[in-house]
Image (cartoon, grey):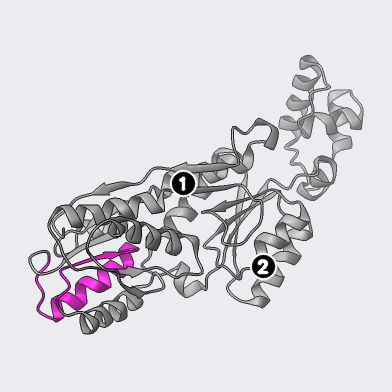
Amino acid sequence: MKRPTLEAVAARAGVSRATVSRVVNGQSTVTPEIRETVLRAVSELGYVPNSAARSLVTQRTDSIALVISEPATRVFSDDRLFSTVIRTVSSELEAADKQIVLMLASAPRGHARVERYISGGHVDGVLLLSMHGADPLPGALTRMGVPVVSYGRPAVAVEMPYVDNDNVGGASAAVRHLLDSGRRRIATIAGPQDMIGGQDRLTGYREALRDSDRRSIVAVGDFTRASGISAMRQLLEDDPSLDAVFVANDVMAIGALQVLRQAGRRVPDDVAVVGFDDIEAVRYTDPPLTTVRHPIPEQATAMVRLLLTPPQERASDRVILPSELVVRESA
């Protein structure tokens, strides 16, 4: 059967094609009576708007790109940050009658592909996740003028709306907890220093130690379990007498717990461990991990709502959510 056309709907409703187009595209310049008549004709004929033609009229695609600057092996790993953000963003966009376009960009070729796609007008806005310092996308998207919101403060000097959590305050609270429990040699496994989250959590660690007589003991990871394993081994070699470690994310902390167990160090008796994020898996580690709750679903939700709110209606272009120390048996 032939697909019903605007002309067929117009003939059934007894109105012009232009009137049907205005009703279908959600314009408010049609009286309620005529709108009802047109919608009845649409239902009777089974008319489905042509999305490409509709986009030409409305200048909207009803699609939002979620761009993650990481390789697929990292996005689809055991780090629940990515799956939680993707799931939350998808749900929020579905509720707003929009769809998600997931794009990975971990290399120059991927960045160029994303830029071409977005500059081609295929999406109405962009959500950025896991940006690194050298990432060209924030600057490129800003120059395009496309609506964009970053998950976390951008690592480059661009004016861009963002939603973040209190990384510095959360890290400071974790280290103060270790200090208050009498720990003397408190190390940290910091996150990557080309990412704002990694920088801020290291800053919080150092601020908490600044007024004490403890010195900083730092190893740097990249937010993966393997890097947590490597960094924990390095810390034990550099300072075998350390008695606590603050780890900049839970995935690395799980790796650190593995190394401590293999080295015969009891947690928390010999070495206390605190992570950051409060992913579900740390409730079941041995022992359950004390960590800083990073409100990932709330941050992703706020990011979508900020993007979908017109700039003139926003209270602010910056949203900072609180973090919270969750005390369990590891510290």
Q: Quadrant of residue 278?
A: bottom left
Q: CA distance from mark 2 to mark 1?
A: 23 Å
Q: Please state which of residues 33 and 173 is positioned toward the viewer in this rendering.
A: 173
- Residue drawn at x 66%, y 56% as measured from the top left: 158
Q: Quadrant of residue 60?
A: top right
Q: Please state which of residues 204 and 71 is positioned toward the viewer in this rendering.
A: 204
Residue identifier under label 2: 136
Q: Residues within 10 Å of mark 1 (few under 14, many from 20)?
A: many
Residue identifier under label 1: 299
**Would you place residue 11 above or below residue 205 in this image?**
above
53 with respect to 302 (left or right) = right
27 with respect to 170 (left or right) = right
Res 46 visible: yes
Q: Is residue 263 magenta?
A: yes
Q: Where is residue 219? Give x, y as percent.
A: 33, 75
- Residue drawn at x 73%, y 48% as measured from the top left: 61
Q: Where is residue 288? Give x, y as percent.
A: 17, 59
Q: In the drawing, what numbered circle is on residue 100? A: none
What's under tag 2, amino acid-wise?
A: Pro
Q: Please state which of residues 120 and 312 is positioned toward the viewer in this rendering.
A: 312
The earlier-in-sequence mark between 2 and 1 is 2
